[in-house]
Amino acid sequence: MTEPRRHKRTPSRTVVAFSVSYQKESLLARGMGLEHLKELVSRLARPMVSEGLSVAYAGHWRVTEDNFTHLLLQLISAEQDDTSDDPEQNPDAARTVAPLINHLAWPHYLTVTPRIEAEAINSCRIVRVTQEQAGIADVCPDGEAFSGSDRAVFNAAATLSAMRRFQTEGMSLDVVPGERTEDVPPLAARILIGGKVSGSSGFAPGILEEAVLMLERGTPLYVLGGFGGVAGELAQLFLGSVPPPDITVDRLESGIPALTRLRQLAEARGLPPGCRATADLIESLRQKASAVAGGAVSLASAMNTGLGDADLRALMTTGDVDKAVRLVLSGLRALGLLVDPT
């Protein structure tokens, strides 16, 4: 007789975030496609979900082939179903699988209808970050959100920046205003994969800003550079590639015209508290990389992944899904965030 599977899940306040976006050309140049990226994310997330960790992903809800929000929700739902095979013996089992934490900034959360949220209520916790929480004084009405006006564009970028900061540092939500609050824990680690160099709606490409926030806090940062995108450029920068990647304001603005507009709006309006200009983020990133290059800080200390120097360099350069999964999980286990299977 086969012994029933034993689950090690314990509800956890440990949150690991994924920062991932599909860069078709970058992957094709490496002989890979979207299916490789989906396999990578699934194989990384599954053991985390299985052991009760919370997975965070600040992704949209549009129905597209490269929507990783839906991929993670499917994985979590399947894991919840697996824990509730015998509801009479273990009626609360499904609740031991932590739901996806989906951080959404204004105005992006406006597109999530009550029906969508209700359908995902057991597998997802949506955390809305408002303009007011971002410290914006001149609040834009929701009816103007997608108008393309200066106020809408500027407020959306500032709220997006605040969302990334709150996701990294944790935040408190008023569940029942004045009566009950809920704490959303800070990140215990972040995994960077891909990342769009163009098309950003914030003051910097998302993965770049998220990397800066993690590096400044010293929170474990897994940069999977071998799959291209912004993560690939960050890996090159910290590994001292020659020539170094062109991570500059001029280069970013040439690829993201909206950044020029945002810079001009910021100069005219001033930035809300905690919101940072593109140049400031890039300067912080370069200082961190220079400290590694100059020997003041080791690469292993800067990334704090639980991996030794050789394994960390391998992780930051490999395009092999098996190797990347093995190294990330090994680092998480070394940090005590995952249980060592041995």
Image (cartoon, rainbow, N blue to C red):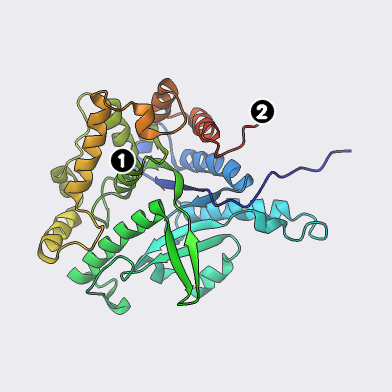
Q: Which percent across, then down, holds residue 250? A: 13, 45
Quick one: label 2, few (<14), some, or many (20+) residues within 10 Å?
A: few
Quarter residue 153 falls in? bottom left
Decide which of 85, 292 is in the foreground and name it: 292
Residue that extends furthest to the top in the rendered view of this protein:
310
Q: Which percent across, then down, holds residue 51? A: 63, 44
From this view, report whether residue 320 is shown above or below residue 251: above
For the C terminus, the image quarter is: top right
Label 2: which secondary element:
loop
Could one spot residue 149 in this view of the protein? no
In the image: residue 317, left or right of residue 157 = right
In the image: residue 78, left or right of residue 68 = right
For the point 55% across and 55% down, the residue is: 73
Quarter residue 267 falls in? bottom left
Q: Which percent across, then down, holds residue 108? A: 37, 65
Q: Which percent across, then down, holds residue 186? A: 44, 52
From this view, report whether residue 215 is shown above or below residue 256: above
The residue pinned by badge 2 equals 342
Quick one: label 1, few (<14), some, or many (20+) residues within 10 Å?
A: many
Q: Disc 2 versus disc 1: distance between alpha carbons?
A: 35 Å
The residue pinned by badge 1 equals 230
For the N terminus, the image quarter is: top right
For the point 65% across and 32% down, the residue is: 341
Mark 2 vs mark 1: give the one in front: 2
For the point 42% across and 60% down, the residue is: 171
